[in-house]
Amino acid sequence: MANTPSAKKAARKIERRTAINKARRTRVRTHLRKVEEAIASGDQSAANDALKTAQPELMRAVTKGVFHRNLAARKISRLNARIKALSA
């Protein structure tokens, strides 16, 4: 356990940050799950709409340091490819 006042404060800050990051990660996963469900149902327009709402959420998580930018780009790219494949 932290002994010095600065270490105690750091522990409090980390705890707050962790809660915020956890909420962000959960929100992103929820949006991604909605896109996955729309793709699974085969509804291309619903999948496009879901991706349009998920994309800014994912990129916001990147700017806040929750996800790496390459991970976000890869996920968006792969989801986009799967949505395009629905029309074929």
Image (spheres, rainbow, N blue to C red):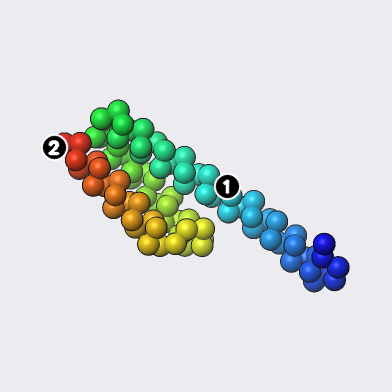
- Which residue appears at 33% of the width and 56% of the height? 74
Q: What residue is shown with label 1?
A: 23
For the C terminus, the image quarter is top left
Mark found first going from the N terminus, 1 or 2:
1
Residue 80: image location, x then y, percent: 26, 47
- Amino acid of disc 2: Ala
Q: Position of residue 59 (x, y in %)?
A: 41, 56
Q: Amino acid at mark 1?
A: Ala
Q: Is residue 28 left or right of residue 83?
A: right
Q: Whole-percent x and y of residue 57? A: 43, 50
Asked if the residues shown at circle 1 and circle 2 are in contact, with their CB atoms under 8 angstroms apart, the answer is no
Asked which secondary structure carries label 1, the reply is helix
Residue at 25% over, 34% down: 45
Image quadrant holding the N terminus, namely bottom right
In front: 73, or 55?
73
Front label number (1 vs 2): 2
Dot 2: element: loop
Q: Residues within 10 Å of mark 1 (few under 14, many from 20)?
A: few
Picture layout, residue 72 above or below residue 8: above
User: Position of 42 compared to 2: left or right?
Assistant: left
Residue position marked by numbered label 2 in the rendering: 88
Rendered position, 21 above or below 45: below
Question: Which image quarter: residue 40?
Answer: top left
